[in-house]
Image (tube, rainbow, N blue to C red):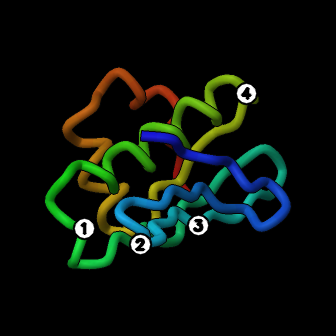
Amino acid sequence: MDIEHNAAQRRFETVVDGVSCVLEYDLRDGVMTITHTGVPVQVGGRGIAGELVKSAFETARREGWRVVPACSYASAWIQRHPAYADLVTRA
């Protein structure tokens, strides 16, 4: 899956079967707050949201950012992926 980091719009994006999927975030003082993960139902169930969140966390690690998983999907994802728990902070 090809996921693009669109830093100017503060989002991670991919297109699957012609359908746009996104993870949106805010960035302030080295803290990435994941605000929304959106995968339309027609391409759901393929692990796309998980790959978007993983890309966000990997970018945060590379950049030295902390992460607030404010959206419900990102919050649930981090519970299943403790290898990234060291990046999590509170808002």
Sequence order check, earlier mark of 1 and 3: 3
Which residue position is annotated with label 1? 43
Q: Could you tell me which secondary element the residue under label 1 belongs to?
A: helix
Residue drawn 22% across the image and 76% down it:
42
Q: Could you tell me which secondary element the residue under label 4 belongs to?
A: loop
Q: Amino acid at mark 4?
A: Gly
Identify the mark at residue 24; answer none if there is no mark: 3
Which residue position is annotated with label 4? 64
Q: Could you tell me which secondary element the residue under label 3 belongs to?
A: strand
Would you say the residues marked 1 and 2 are in contact, meaning their CB atoms lie under 8 Å apart? yes
Which residue position is annotated with label 2? 19
Q: CA distance from mark 1 to mark 2?
A: 7 Å
Q: CA distance from mark 1 to mark 3?
A: 18 Å
Q: CA distance from mark 1 to mark 4?
A: 32 Å
Would you say the residues marked 2 and 3 are in contact, meaning their CB atoms lie under 8 Å apart? no
Q: Amino acid at mark 2?
A: Val
Residue 20 coordinates in the image, percent (x, y): 48, 71
Would you say the residues marked 2 and 4 are in contact, meaning their CB atoms lie under 8 Å apart? no
